Image (cartoon, rainbow, N blue to C red):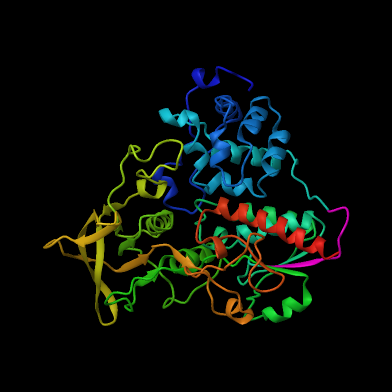
Amino acid sequence: MGNPKGFMEVGRKESGYRPISERVDDYGEVEQTLNEGDRVLQASRCMDCGIPFCHWACPVGSKIPEWQDAIYKGEWKLASDILHSTNSFPEFTGRICPNPCEKSCVLAIHDEAVTIRENEASVVEKAFAEGYIQPRIPVKRTGKKVAIIGGGPAGLSAADRLNQMGHTVTVFEKDEAVGGLLRFGIPDFKLNKKVIDRRIDIFEKEGIIIKTNQYVGFDVKGAQLLKDFDAVVLAIGAMQPRDLPVEGRELKGVHFAMEFLTQQNRVNRGQKFAAKDRIDVKGKNVLVIGGGDTGSDCVGTSNRQKAKSVTQIEILPKPPVKRADENPWPYWPTTLKTSSSHSEGCDRQWSLSTKRFIGQGGALKQVELVEVEWSKDENGGWKMNEKAGSEKIVDVDHVFLSMGFVHAIHEGLVKEIGVDTDQRGNLKIDGNYQTSVDKVFAAGDSHNGASLVVTAIQKGKEAAINVDNFLMEKE
């Protein structure tokens, strides 16, 4: 703890965002950066608590007080080394993590948490700029081969750990580039994809083999991989979106959120789409159904495409601005979140359910909404009731369904090799991350259900440890 009075002498200072008038005209990252002097001061605010609740709340168990102290002392390489000891991708989480660590910081009791996430991003960028982050070539190879199916955060995290353990790792990715939703789901204005490319370049130099455009279960059969590899890790995510099966769902203009976001990310990469396939909301009325981060990303993307209007609705009641009594610190706060995309322009509404989509000539024209009320039933569970007479018809040209994901996609690989699933549709694993199929493991959202990027990274890390134990026991 370099400055024991730092939290009293220095106030919380965030880097903030680029001006709205500037950022809505491009897909560059919206977040700005502080100068090094200010960043050191922000790190000095860490109190090195006797019980580091920030560490407790972080899915990857980041040793936050330790690397804050290293920043304050100007020991940037040490800070980077500490970060990387628990997280293969602090440059990703430093940009897009919802930072549960900050919500559990003791200073958060007074809404003055240490700027942990921003500090993390600054450490990694400083480390890259100074050349501290270099390929680490494994000294010895075990001769064991591992196939990772899926190049998202869980798969890449497992690949990194297993490669450093000396195994020969091949990542099979169905898309044209690895990254999963980091690359094709999260907008460029939140995560510049060059940040992913930079890390992948290091991985390839370290010996990880990456094969893109390889949809295992279709282009490549899982049975063949079981013959060719000593272990297989399924890191295929939870990519089955939750649908809204109401009247008019088939109308042109009703899309899953990921159809919209992945297409725009590909356009940003230079890919061309035929006019009939392009989802372009310029001058159109947009409705986003779902109040989470993916919905917010649809809002920001719609603003950049110059939509006429953007409305986001949520079926749940509006959250409180401050923590409720039953939602105390240091637990995750179920409070109102306003993103950079919301501040760019969005009409947000709560306690609304969608009754039907209304079209003309096969194209979406309107949507019927109804207000809902929530109450507890006799068993203490919540039940929803429509509010009589509250129906309304709204003009809308495009609807984006952003209601989360339900489970991994079963068609293809999962059905081919016969992996068991649980009652929710997730891949079933035992305490060693093994599935019902011999030498097949699962990592991340595929078994855990849709969650945070930082959680996927941790699950990939834990799966890698178990795969290594499995392979070494075979010696």
Q: Is residue 353 left or right of residue 416?
A: left
Location of residue 203 (image quadrant): bottom right
Q: Quadrant of the N terminus?
A: top right
Residue 229 in the image, given as x and y percentages of width and height: 77, 72
Q: State how many labels appear.
A: 0
Residue located 55% across and 20% down the image: 6
Location of residue 316 (image quadrant): bottom left
Location of residue 130 (image quadrant): top right
Q: Quadrant of the C terminus?
A: bottom right
- In this picture, is 363 found above or below 375? below
- In this picture, is 231 found above or below 205? below
Residue 371 in the image, given as x and y percentages of width and height: 20, 59
Range shown magenta: 138-148
Name the chief secondary structure element in magenta.
Answer: loop
Q: Is residue 261 magenta?
A: no
Q: Is residue 315 left or right of residue 463?
A: left
- Asked if residue 408 shows in the view, the reply is yes
In this view, the residue in front, 44 or 158, is: 158
In this view, the residue in front, 32 or 64, is: 64
In this view, the residue in front, 105 or 292, is: 105
